[in-house]
Image: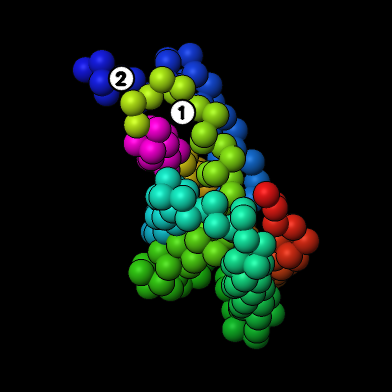
Amino acid sequence: MPDSVAALWPAPPQLAAFALAVFVLNATPGVDLLLTLSRTWQAGVRAGAAAALGITAGCAVHALAAGLGLAAVLALHPQAYVVLQWAGAAYLLWLGGQMLHSAWRPAATAAAPGAAPLPALSLPAEFRRGLLTNVLNPKVALFFLAFLPPFVPAASPDKTVSFLLLGAWFVLQGGLFLLAVVALADRVARRARHGASGPLKRLLEAAGGVLFIALALRILKERPVTA
């Protein structure tokens, strides 16, 4: 690797620490992980993968926005943060309401033990669901603004490029992690479905809806970080 390119990256020990921190953050339960698990469980591996890719694309949007300084607008202007905060919470409330409606509608009782997963939305719709869930979460934007700069090398010849490279690493590692979650969740779901009754499936979907609503309410309690 040419010295000019190597200078854009942290030293190997710092890069290893960055990768470990990214893994811990990805494994921490939150909206992205919950959506990936719920879509895989309810609609199968293709729906889960599409949602995971949408979430990954949302992270790429946030990383690019932070690199261009747009995320700083949210930190400096609480009004902009609140608008995005309410939009994200409203979207999560809508998703949670949909899941609760699906769980309690009469058609949901027709599922038999060992049945196939519920029909998925179209894959583009699953992708959009993951994308919007991530993009409309202002905490993700501020996270990139707070998490990446400490890992940018002090001697980097172009700190913006270093920031974007670290953002790309985060997005790639996070996307691979979510796809691994999809594969594991699908294996578990396939085994569970052989003994899962209709009421159990309804209970799981209802629990997912309640969790999404709880996450929306938690987002609304967050306060913007002011300069």
Location of residue 21 in the rendering, given as x and y in whole percent from the top left corner: 57, 29
Name the residue tied to disc 1. Answer: 152
Question: Which residue is depicted at the point 27% across and 23% down?
Answer: 5
Location of residue 215 in the rendering, given as x and y in whole percent from the top left corner: 70, 61
Q: Quadrant of residue 97?
A: bottom right
Whether residue 43 is visible here, answered yes or no, is no
Please give the range of residues in magenta: 159-171
Image check: 190 left or right of 203? left
Quadrant for the N terminus in the image: top left
Location of residue 87 in the rendering, given as x and y in whole percent from the top left corner: 60, 72
Q: Residues within 10 Å of mark 1 (few under 14, many from 20)?
A: many
Q: Residues within 10 Å of mark 2 (few under 14, many from 20)?
A: few
Question: Which residue is depicted at the point 73% across and 65% down?
Answer: 220
In front of the other: 77 or 37: 77
Image check: 211 left or right of 41? right
Looking at the rendered structure, which numbered label has been put on residue 78?
none
In front of the other: 54 or 48: 54
| Secondary structure mainly formed by the magenta segment | helix
Question: Which residue is depicted at the point 46% across and 28% down?
Answer: 152
In magenta stretch: residue 161: yes
Q: Quadrant of residue 98?
A: bottom right
In magenta stretch: residue 132: no
In front of the other: 80 or 27: 80
Q: Secondary structure at mark 2?
A: helix
Going by the numbered disc 1, the residue's amino acid type is Val
154 vs 133: above or below: above
Query: From mark 1 to mark 2, how far is it between C-alphas?
Result: 12 Å
11 vs 75: above or below: above
Name the residue tied to disc 2. Answer: 6
Question: Which residue is depicted at the point 65% across and 67% down?
Answer: 79
Whether residue 181 is visible here, answered yes or no, is yes
**Mark 2 or mark 1, which is nearer the start of the sequence?**
2
